[in-house]
Structure formats: C-alpha cells, structure tokens
Amino acid sequence: MAINPITSDFVSGAVLTAAQMNRLPRGVLGYATSSTSYTLTTSPVIATGMTLTLALASARFLKITYIEPQAGTPNVAGGFTTTTIKLTSAAGTQLSQGVIQTPSAASIGGSVINSYINIFSASTYTFVGCGATSSVSGAPVFTRSATNLAMLLIEDLGPG
C-alpha cells in the first residue's frame, strides 16, 4: 500500500497548495449509531441502523470501525456470536469479523469491536455492520440503549 504524505514542513509565507491539502486526512466521513436492541439469527443480517454509504473522489485510506456495546451469545457450549463489516449488503464481501464465544452452556455477553483499514478507490461504497449467532437457543441479542450505542464509523486516514 502506497502512502502519499506531505514531505515538507509548512513555513510562514509559503503558499499552501491543493496537492498538499489533498494529502491531509479528512477525518470522519460517516457515523451511524443505534440505541435499538437487535435479536440475532443464525444468518448474517444487517444490524439495526448499521449502514453507511459514501462517495470517494480519489483513492483514500479508510478505517471502518463497528462496535456492538453488548453482544450476547447463545446458551450452548461453544456457542458464538459474530459481528462483521461487509461491503454493500449482508451477503457482500466480508472485510472484518469479531467473535464472542461461550465455553459452557451459559450465555455470556461483552463488547465486540472490529475494524478494517485499506485503500478504497474513487467510487461510491455502502458499508454495513452485520450480526449472526451459531444458535438462537437463549435468544442472543445485541443489547443497546441511549447511553450504550452501537456504532459504525468511517474515517479517512489520508491518500492511498
């Protein structure tokens, strides 16, 4: 992956160029949150509120982060719950996966955070946060609230 940083210092009186400005990170490009809890299924499904679409004008390094504040597992030994970042839809290309697993037949819960960093070329992209579980025994849920939000965040780290 090529990195195209600004290679000289800025000095008083110098002219700041468009090329230099285009080498700077652009920060947060998209941010989605949800306080609505989501009951998991055994098939990957876009979790409530976890969709962001953005258009890139040029090749950029992006960091995509998906956070579920409280992901529950099924109440079966070895049962697991996954979160994934995918392109386009729940059936799209998987970019990243987070897993929480129970060693016994008791449901557990915890935060799941996964992120993905890569160069994306100029185009329009839809990023989704998905969830799935190995079993619906015990009704595993992504538990959310107004003070415990799920989040999908896209950040521009600079040119690619």
Image (cartoon, rainbow, N blue to C red):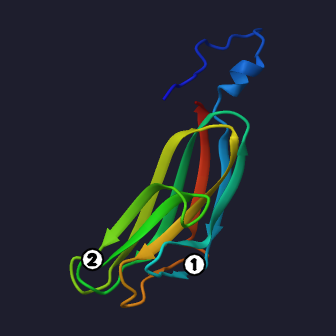
Q: In this view, does 15 lie above or below 83?
A: above
Mark 2 lies on residue: 102
Q: Distance between the residues labelled 1 and 2?
A: 23 Å
> x and y percent of residue 115 in the render?
47, 52
Could you say where residue 149 lies in the image, as x and y percent from the top left? 57, 70
Using a 10 Å C-alpha cutoff, classify the residue at mark 2 as few (fewer than 14 neighbours), some (14 to 19) or many (20 or more): some
Residue corresponding to mark 1? 145
Does label 1 or label 2 sit earlier along the sequence?
2
Residue type at mark 1 is Ser
**Residue at (60%, 32%) from the top-left corner?**
158
- Packing grade of label 1 (10 A; few <14, some 14-19, many >=20) is few
Q: What element carries label 2?
A: loop
**Res 4 quadrant in image:** top right
Q: In which quarter of the image is the C terminus?
A: top right
Judged by depth in the image, the label closer to the viewer, 1 or 2, is 2
**In the image shown, does 58 or 70 lie closer to the viewer?**
58
Identify the amino acid type marked 2. Thr
Give the farthest residue toward the bottom.
Answer: 138
Left or right, 120 with respect to 98, comes to right
Label 1 sits on a secondary structure element that is loop
Query: Which numbered marker is on residue 46?
Result: none
Residue at the spot 59% in from the left edge and 55% down from the top edge: 153
Where 7 sits versus 75, above or below?
A: above
Q: Residue at x 56, y 81 (%)?
A: 37
- Above or below for 116 versus 157: below
The percent position of residue 114, horizontal first and vertical second, equals 45, 57
